[in-house]
Amino acid sequence: MNNRLPPAWSKHLKSGVMPKPRWPQASPPQPSLQNSLARAQADDALLKKAYECQQAKRLDEAQDLCFQVLARTPNHPLALYIMGTVCLGYDHEAALRYFARAVGEEPRNPYYHLSLGEAYGKLSEFSAAVKHIQYALEVQPDLVEALCALGGVYTQFDKPDLALPLYEQALRIKRDHPKARIGIAAALTGLGRMDEAASYLKEAIERRIDVAAAYYDLVQTRKFTEEPAEFQSILRELNRPGLKPEAKASLNYAAGKVGNDLKRYAQAFDHFRKAKQAEGHKFDIDQYRRFIDLTIETFTPDFFAARSGYGNSSEAPVFVVGMPRSGTTLTEQICASHPEAHGAGELSKLRRVANAIGLQASASDFSKPISTITEGLSKTLAHEHHSYLRERAPTAQRIIDKMPHNFELIGLLSLLFPKARIIHCRRDAIDNCVSCYVLPFNSTHGYNADLQALGLYYREYDRLMRHWNEVFPGRIFENRYETLVENQEAQSRRLIDYLGLPWDDACLRFFDREGAVTTPSRWQVRQPIYKSSVRRWKNFEAEITPLIEALGDLAEV
């Protein structure tokens, strides 16, 4: 969630008692003007409370207070802005709408443009994100948070070389700004410049700047063969009183990563478990089962046979899907190393389309959403999506979207792009789940909160993928992680052949490829393929009984 609010708060909210207006004796105040002043004063008081609730993360209270203001003053820009910041943590589409309305009311406010740009960035809308953040900088060139936000967008969208000078400028303005310190390290890490990234992170820790996040990012920059000095420092940080849940989670993940590197597996897993407890995410497996049931019931062979003329026939889109940590980043990097392919990273565009139509986990019925997708609409949506991909790679023959959870949306993507290639990354079930568990995922991945939920979720993923293979026999390329690491060249050649491209030896040296990697796999994909992650779960066998039981017959013990 974005806790930033404009420092020009005082222009919106007046602290203390407002002075009584002095009216000319001959012209007593009109009731309508008095009412307007009283309403403005009441709005200010409510928004001040809403801001306090937002800062304290009492989001429901903040939202209710903003609604009270908007009921009286429907286009109050600050109320719209606060609503946007409240929604940004869990509903990016709603945040986008609120920020856009705030910009409409105050089109020269740099903070409103900045937040609108950040919301676009979270929705993978690169051009719109850059446009609004750049406008914020035109209005206020020294706005450090805008410099950092623009740097973050460039890093996210494979332009880290453009991000570095922005972070450097931000640090010249405000040396200890946490987003600048952590952001420049992220950009350098994305470029594979691990030592430089580590240097910035160590300085951040020395200067007590976002210490927990800095420690977490620092331990990702290398693999440890002996205990680093930072390990004991991390443990001391964990004993500090008053540690916030986010900091506790980050520090435990950092300690767990070091412990795992050092083969102290029981100690490492204890830290991972404590990190999950600090995050406190929840997951409704019953609701998710209903979503999978609806998907299977809706997207049948007869459904697609009746819609054979739908969508766009382009072969440019490639979707790499699967569970997180199943090898999707590695697969994308190998494919994107080909000179005729472009790796676009994890794009949320398809999910936005699904949400707009109503194909969501919370839906009770898919018949109405599906009925809205006419042949004409399918072509319009596909054309817009194709243009969105082409914006990232105007000339590439193949453009790769590696959002893993698009496995849920193979029905929709096949409706829009019937000739799109789909690569399904599959990995040993226990290894895959353990690899998820030891990493921080946000609240939208609530299934990763505990071992039993994770195992049950995996079973639903497996059930859906089996359905897609029945609906589209022979269409989906299954890329087994274990096969890839056992014989990199043979499997890489099969991948490139599936893409319909001629072989290029650059695909064997994917780890030399320039470009940003912003997923948790960023350290691994800067190395040649290694086999140490195969059967890794054995290291934690004593700790993961609930996972193995939940996986049932999918667990190859």
Image (spheres, rainbow, N blue to C red):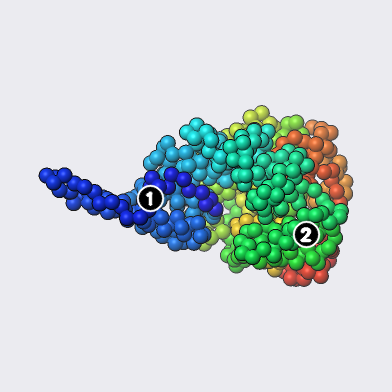
Mark 2 vs mark 1: which is more N-terminal?
1
Whole-number angstrom distance, CA of label 2 to CA of label 1: 46 Å
Q: Is residue 482 left or right of residue 549?
A: right
Between 63 and 405, the one lying in front of the other is 63
Instruction: Residue 320: give its label.
Output: none
Between 258 and 200, the one lying in front of the other is 200
Q: Given the image, on which type of amino acid does mark 1 rest?
A: Leu
At 86% from the left edge and 53% from the top edge, which residue is drawn? 225
Between 8 and 19, the one lying in front of the other is 19
Check disc 2 and report its element: helix, strand or loop.
helix
At 67% from the left edge and 48% from the top edge, which residue is drawn? 207
Rendered-image quadrant of the C terminus: bottom right
Between 555 and 240, the one lying in front of the other is 240
Check disc 1 and report its element: helix, strand or loop.
loop
At 83% from the left edge and 63% from the top edge, which residue is drawn? 264
Q: In this view, does 11 lie to the left or right of 321?
A: left
Q: Is residue 34 left or right of residue 366?
A: left
At 84% from the left edge and 38% from the top edge, which residue is drawn? 508
> Tag 1: Cα neighbours inside 10 Å, few (<14), some, or many (≥20)?
some
Q: Percent x, y for residue 515? A: 72, 36
Q: Percent x, y for residue 67? A: 38, 56
Disc 2 + disc 1, Cβ < 8 Å: no
- One can see residue 127 in this view: yes
> Tag 2: Cα neighbours inside 10 Å, few (<14), some, or many (≥20)?
few
**Residue for badge 1:** 13
Relative height, residue 235 to residue 214 (above, below): below
- One can see residue 436 in this view: no
Q: Percent x, y for residue 381? A: 53, 41
Q: Residue furthest top?
A: 395
Q: Given the image, on which type of amino acid does mark 2 rest?
A: Gln
**Residue for badge 2:** 232
